[in-house]
Image (tube, helix red, strand yellow):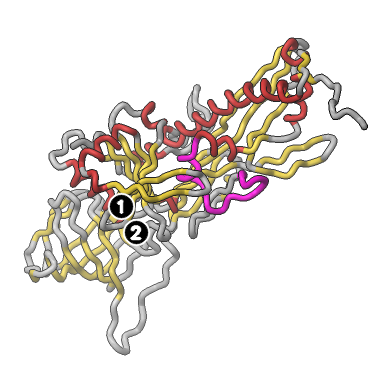
Amino acid sequence: MASPATGQTYTLGGVVQEVMDKNLRLFPILFKQFKHINYAFFDVQTLAGEGGLSLKPKEINGIESALTVDGTSLKWLDYALFDFNTKIASNATVTLSSTSGTFTVGDTSGFAVNDRIVGVKSDDGTSDEFEGIVTSITNATTMVVTVTRYNGSTTVSATQAIVVKAGQVIERAFWARNDNDEILRPSNLYNYTEYKSVIQHFSRRIEFTKAELNQEYRYEGDAKSLAAKKFSYQIAILVQELNKAIYKGINRMPGAGANDKMEMMGLEFICEQAGSIKDLSASTQPLLDFYNELEKSFRSGAIAGEEPMMMLCNDKHLTQLSRANRDLVRYDKFVEVLNYTIPSINTIYGNVDIVRDPMLNKLYNYPVAFVLPRSLIKLWVRENQDYNPQGGINRADQSIRLYEVIHNLREKKMYDIEFEMGIIAGGLSATDCPFRMIKNFHV
């Protein structure tokens, strides 16, 4: 009977060469240390593959992304509300003549003569609410509106003045007609807006010296363990960089400046562009203002399903929230696939999942939270094909790729580790952007 002992010895160089032909799966690494990223940005309900540990990006209803021609960015069409609204262009006091007034707005393309409209009161309450009918459209930004009611109840007089504010919403209600009237309302295309997010490279070079590669180990596991430590440490740093880019990326194109490289679109950048950063440091009613921000996310109309709203936050924010009302937070949601507990806030609008991200403790030394619909955000992973002279073209997969660096240094081996990701966010064109950043919440 043959002995089961192999009688072999192993070198680190031989083990590393084996790894070269087997790209490292991204999901198992995220699964162990970054479960909040999996829950927030991937579809944890449809994990598949060997051992159930491969990455499955979630789908956003109605949004299909595509690479740009130059391959540096993702593009998608955001559908918002599938209806037409616009905003007042600048502060003005519109004096009516025979109850008609001329309103300058951002865009009239979604409106037609005889559309019933509603002028929505601005959040600060300093503008006037009004209702009216579009009498004529003179150009792309100007329409004459016959105002029929004022403040929802009082009939407008012939010389009434109406205060409008920049950013005040003009919402199209409906187009009406009588029996036997000709239908003059033209058809319109969907109110799509194109958005773009730059793809970011996460990469690092790892080196093995000649002595490390040629040292002999009695057991294969010993050699693999040393190689794994080297790779795991570098990959952990890369995923930390991804975690930071989710918040701090500024959507930077290649060549934007002398030191500028490609950066993905981050949540803080989204909120800054949408004007949805709320600082509560001077608030006299912080809990009420906090709920107002949650309300704006829910009322945006961009939520695509029954997914709950999600709040990514740091520990300082959680501490303040627990002091505000301990009955507010429920701890009854468990994601079995990730072995991960998600507390939630029970509001009258719906549930808000609380996702604690330790990285936010490093990036912000004050209470901070990002509120967004979980169904409208996802990370996109570039699937690259590789050519292997022995096996031909390898199937594209979502993994961390390893490449041997060709160089003239005989005393060491070098390998490049890299993966590429971008972010896709739906609902950005909604009148109230559902993505909101809340700073300095306190009680």
Q: CA distance from mark 1 to mark 2?
A: 8 Å
Please provide the residue range marked out in magenta. Answer: 34-54
Q: In terms of depth relative to the viewer, which is nearer, 32 or 13?
A: 32
Q: Secondary structure at mark 2?
A: loop
Q: Is residue 397 magenta?
A: no
- Percent of width and height locating residue 346: 29, 53
Left or right of 387 in this view: 158: left
**What quarter of the picture does the C terminus occupy?**
top left
- Percent of width and height locating residue 187: 42, 71
Checking the image for residue 301, the label placed there is 2
Query: Which residue in the structure is indicated by mark 1?
Result: 432
Q: Residue visible at 78% across and 11% down?
A: 410
Query: Is residue 301 in view?
Result: yes
Earlier residue among tags 1 and 2? 2
Query: Is residue 196 in view?
Result: no
**What quarter of the picture does the N terminus occupy?**
top right
